Structures are given as C-alpha cells and as structure tokens.
C-alpha cells in the first residue's frame, strides 16, 4: 500500500501503483483502504464503472470516511450520474462540513447541470483558500458576468498558477480556450501536478477526449487513450 501511494503521488507512476495496489488487495482482501486506492487507479485509467463499484463496496463497509464520499461523487460525476454524484458529495459535506474541496465538487456538479447560480453558491461555501478560488473561477465561467469570470481566472493564475496548473486547465476548458487548455496541461506535466491523474475522470476536460492533442498528452504522461475513458464530457 505504502509503495503504491509513493508511486502514485511522488513518481506519477500509475502503472506501478496499480500493480502494488492489486498485490496489496490480494494479500488483504478485506482492507477497505486498499480497495479504495485500487478504485482510484481504475478511475485514473478511465474505468469509472469499476471505480464506482470498488469505492462503493469500500464505503458500504466504512461509510464514515468523508474523503471517500468525495471521490465516489467525482467518479459518478464523470459518468454523468449527476443526481447520484450530488447525493454522494452531500454525504461528504454532512460528515465534514468544512472539508477541503467538497463544496468545489458540488460546484462542478452544478456546472454539469448548467446552473450558474447554484454552482457559485456552492463555490462560495468552500472554505477560504485554494479550493475556494478554484471553485469560484470555475463557477463564474458559466455565468453572465464576464468581467468577474476574467478576474477570477486572472487571480487563480496569479496565486496558484505554479502549483495548480491542472485546475487552470479546467477553467480554460470551461472558457473553451483550446490552446490555453493544452498549454496549462503541459505546465501541469512540467511541474508534476498530481491533478493530471484526474484527467480521464474530469467532465470538464473530457470534452476534448476526441481531440488528437489530448491523445498526444495522455501518451506523454503515461495515461490510456482518452477515447477509452467512460467519462462524459460537457
């Protein structure tokens, strides 16, 4: 488990991490944390149905892990199961109302619905910090206030462009600025942003799953072809 975690998060060696998690689960089939970690590797490879099954099994055995509900929601969101994704993230919020990134996940769900007000309301509930600013920058892109949307993106780049380039790419995807999307994805690769591991899950970036540039990027970072992902882009 520990070796898999290091390979996943420090080296971005997702094939190696998957191997270690599979081995860990074979050694200890009842270990729910191992099962959930393996679910994350299935999701990373775009196998969201399997990720939902594994993480759902883990949650059924240990339902008081707010972070698990958060990721479970993200996998459901990627599949386009919006109502189920909302129910899951609200479980996470109920367990840990001030948890990092939970309200940001709800904002993404509302963005998928096209509800700009609900998305911004969710973003504003995210505690102050990086995820608050990320969520607001995302939510404002689908609203009518273009000046606020531009300002939120500029602030995100100024404050977090060096540490959260993957999230900047997500915001650029909402703006449909294709060149900027791939420029920021390249920067995410350059700085080893672990957010890249969410690429085949993310409904914002999977709108480019048929784009040859996305296929080239996935090849560069060692991910499967984007067209194999079950994620539904918006």
Image (cartoon, rainbow, N blue to C red):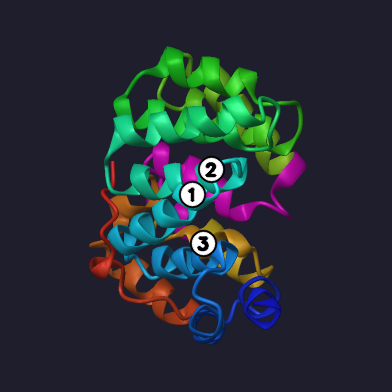
How far apart marks 3 and 1 lie (CA) works out to: 8 Å
How far apart marks 1 and 2 lie (CA) works out to: 5 Å
Q: How many marks?
A: 3
**Mark 3 touches mark 2? (CB < 8 Å):** no
What segment is highlighted magenta in the picture?
159-182
**121 over 198 or under it: above or below:** above
Disc 2 secondary structure class = loop
> In the figure, residue 76 lies in which quadrant?
top left
Would you call the spot at circle 3 few (<14 residues within 10 Å), some (14-19), or many (20 or more)?
A: many
Disc 3 secondary structure class = helix
**Residue shown at 48%/70% (left/top)?**
38
Provide the residue designation for mark 3: 36
Provide the residue designation for mark 2: 63
> In the figure, residue 227 lies in which quadrant?
bottom left
**Residue shown at 51%/78% (left/top)?**
25
Provide the residue designation for mark 1: 59
Point out the frontmost of discs 3 and 2. 2
Of marks 3 and 2, which one's residue comes earlier in the chain? 3
Quadrant where the image shows the C terminus: top left
């Amino acid at each position: 488990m520990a070796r898999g975690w290091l390979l996943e998060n420090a080296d971005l060696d997702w094939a190696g991490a998957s191997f270690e998690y599979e081995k860990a689960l074979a050694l200890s089939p009842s270990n729910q944390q191992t099962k959930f970690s393996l679910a994350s590797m299935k999701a990373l490879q775009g196998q969201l149905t399997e990720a939902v099954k594994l993480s759902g099994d883990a949650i059924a055995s240990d339902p008081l892990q707010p972070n698990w509900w958060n990721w479970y929601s993200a996998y459901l969101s990627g599949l386009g199961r919006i109502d189920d994704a909302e129910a899951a993230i609200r479980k996470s919020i109920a367990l840990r109302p001030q948890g990092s990134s939970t309200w940001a996940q709800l904002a993404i769900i509302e963005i998928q619905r096209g509800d700009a007000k609900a998305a911004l309301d969710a973003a504003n509930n995210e505690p102050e910090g990086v995820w608050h600013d990320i969520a607001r920058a995302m939510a404002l892109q689908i609203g009518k206030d273009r000046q606020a949307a531009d300002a939120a993106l500029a602030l995100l780049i100024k404050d977090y462009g060096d540490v959260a380039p993957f999230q900047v790419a997500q915001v650029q995807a909402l703006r449909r600025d294709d060149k900027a999307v791939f420029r920021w994805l390249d920067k995410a690769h350059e700085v080893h942003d672990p957010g890249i591991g969410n690429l085949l899950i993310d409904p914002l970036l999977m709108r480019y799953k048929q784009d040859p540039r996305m296929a080239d990027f996935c090849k560069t970072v060692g991910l499967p072809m984007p067209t194999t992902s079950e994620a539904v882009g918006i």
